Image: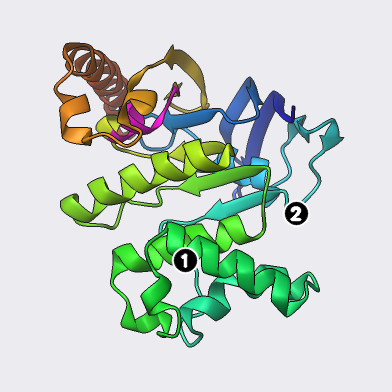
Amino acid sequence: MSTLSIDKISMRFDLPNGSHVQALRDVSLTLNTGELLSVLGPSGCGKTTLLNIVAGFLAPTEGQITLNGTRVRGPAAERGMVFQQGALFEWMSVRDNVSFGPRMAGQREAQWKSTVDHLLDVVGLRDFKEKSVYELSGGMQQRVALARCLANDPDVILMDEPLGALDALTREKMQGLVLKLWKETGKTIILITHSVEEALLLGERLLVMAPRPGRIHREYRLPFAEMGVGQDLRAVKKHPDFATTREEILSMIWDMEEEIMGRNEEAGA
């Protein structure tokens, strides 16, 4: 069983004027294989900073990340990233985008072609494999981004607001696809979102982070992701516990936002 360990992570950004921003302080968490974690909190609470540290894009000021007992010191194939905008090669075909990682890793064509065809089937894009990315809708591009990430067979998939730019109907369909891929692949997933509803739907574990310095305010363990696999997500949202938890978290984050606004008003006085 692979384990992702976030051990007492702190992150401080020093500014040119001599001041600093303490983005994260003493964040600790352990994720085991196949767990699906959603993270939300008020703006500026360090959600994306934490994800970028796990990805290896940033080195923490204090603490460390380990995956399968090995310390994370930079980006690597065992941690795949899906961004809000797909970060795809728009001039390439769908198939060439999805196969890019395996080809760069030196896989033989027979091997990567089979993997890519299977993944395009899974995300519903087999008939579009020869299309250039710029010809696709936003939702279809995010499907390509998911398939490209999976083609590298990472242990952990990191998602930074991957559905935030989509319209409501497409977003709901993509949420169902994320749950389907989670259950079928058994991958560990960390998903950052600003949507409380999405965090509830896609997190069997859900972290609410407190405002700067970012830290874990509360953790929930929820049944809705498991309930949503292969089911109508609108039916899941009608569950009485879903509505109750949503209102509880909304109130929690609202109070944090009010606190932040109060601090800013005092600072500007």
Please, what is the three-letter code of the amino acid marked with disc 1? Answer: Leu
Q: As displayed, is residue 216 above or below residue 53? A: above
Q: Which residue is mark 1?
A: 120
Task: Give x and y (percent) for residue 172.
Answer: 24, 46
Range shown magenta: 198-204
Is residue 199 inside the magenta stretch?
yes
Image quarter hosting the C terminus: top left
Asked whether the viewer can see residue 86, the reply is no
Q: Earlier in the sequence, mark 1 or mark 2?
A: 2
Q: Which residue is mark 2?
A: 76
Residue 203 left/right relative to 46: left
Residue 119 left/right relative to 135: right
**Residue at image location 63% in from the left, 42% down from the top:** 156
Q: Nearer the viewer, residue 224 or 161?
A: 224
Task: Give x and y (percent) for residue 73.
Answer: 81, 46
Please, what is the three-letter code of the amino acid marked with disc 2? Answer: Ala
